[in-house]
Amino acid sequence: MAESERSPDSSEEALPVTQNFKIPKKEINMVPDMGKWKRSQAYADYIGFILTLNEGVKGKKLTCDYKVSESIDKLMALLNTLDQWIDETPPMDQPSRFGNKAFRTWYAKLDQEAESLVAAVVPKHLEAAVPEVAVYLKESVGNSTRIDYGTGHEAAFAAFLCCLCKIGVLRSEDQMAIVFKVFNRYLEIMRKLQKTYRMEPAGSQGVWGLDDFQFLPFIWGSSQLIEHPNLEPRHFVDEKAVNENHKDYMFLECILFITQMKTGPFAEHSNQLWNISAVPSWSKVNQGLIRMYKAECLEKFPVIQHFKFGSLLPIQPVSS
């Protein structure tokens, strides 16, 4: 099997018991460093993880039946804690419209508690991995200085889940629950953070970007819709179709959120998505979004400069 097509847990057998975990750090400091990233084991494992999950949710509804393991339940409890902290940290009364400073209070709590939250998910014999894995959780919720959030933070959450797969906490039978339960819950919390603290979109391309905040749910969400008997890409700009189906499909849930947050004609505020609605099939949409994700997120220095590398997602080149 090619490197990029491994199942999420296939590396767990390869993980030595003597694994030397380390705190992930920045390695991409200048534009020329991007070559190191694209050749790295981290890139191969990350994109392999995204594509494996893309395959795992193909043609499936959010509401379908799937296995929910104990690890998934523990991750849901972790996310519910983050949600509860938002309720306990109301926005401050301040003059500026964007970037409510109460987010920094909320983030400080996560910064302090991240390792104990992750320790509750990871079995005792893997506790040495906790400090490494917790870094990705902290990176996944936005920047506390700028009070912004974007696809780089989203990538950190996917990396967090990928690391949990690499140490064997999550397994290949968890694939659907990773996307439909854990990632979907993460999205709900990120939307709540964005609304509560008026977070700025990080590195947004405005009308020329796919979305101000997310990318992965459009990839996995389009995969869900492949070979749908009725819903075609042209239907996602139809309010009725979105309202009737958003609980089943991640892609439509994203569209609903955009229309709630933005005013004016869809073609104007979300031009790229509007263009995608003209693509004839969901499989073509899915393939196009994967290409776009690589080009617009994974190969863009402003996004990847913040990515951190450790023992689980190493900067070292793929070993041939």
Image (spheres, grey):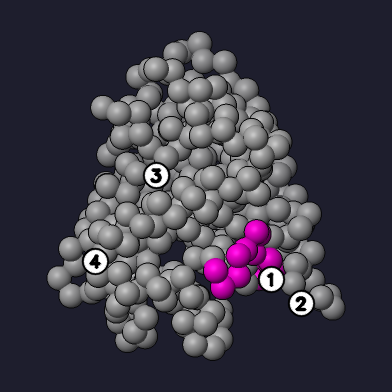
Point out residue 48 in the picture as x, y percentages from the top left corner: 38, 37
Q: Is residue 132 visible?
A: no
- Quarter containing the N terminus: top left
Circle 4/circle 1 CB separation < 8 Å: no
Residue 259 lies in the magenta-colored region: no
- Secondary structure under tag 4 reads loop
Q: Which amino acid type is marked by label 4?
A: Ser
- Quarter containing the C terminus: top left
Q: To which residue does mark 4 refer?
A: 281
Q: Which amino acid type is marked by label 3?
A: Ile
**Which residue sits at x=71%, y=36%?**
29
Dot 1 or dot 2: first in sequence order is 2
- C-alpha gap between disc 3 and disc 4: 21 Å
Dot 3 or dot 1: first in sequence order is 3
The nearer-to-camera label among 4 and 2 is: 4
Q: To which residue does mark 1 refer?
A: 198
Q: Mark on residue 50?
A: 3
Residue at the farthest top position:
18
Question: In the rendered structure, which segment of residues is drawn in magenta?
Answer: 196-208
Q: To which residue does mark 2 refer?
A: 97
Circle 1/circle 2 CB separation < 8 Å: yes
How would you rate the neighbour count of disc 1 (Cα within 10 Å): few for under 14, some for 14-19, many for 20 or more? many
Residue at the farthest right position:
95
Q: Which amino acid type is marked by label 2?
A: Arg
Point out residue 182 in the picture as x, y percentages from the top left corner: 43, 51
- C-alpha gap between disc 4 and disc 1: 35 Å
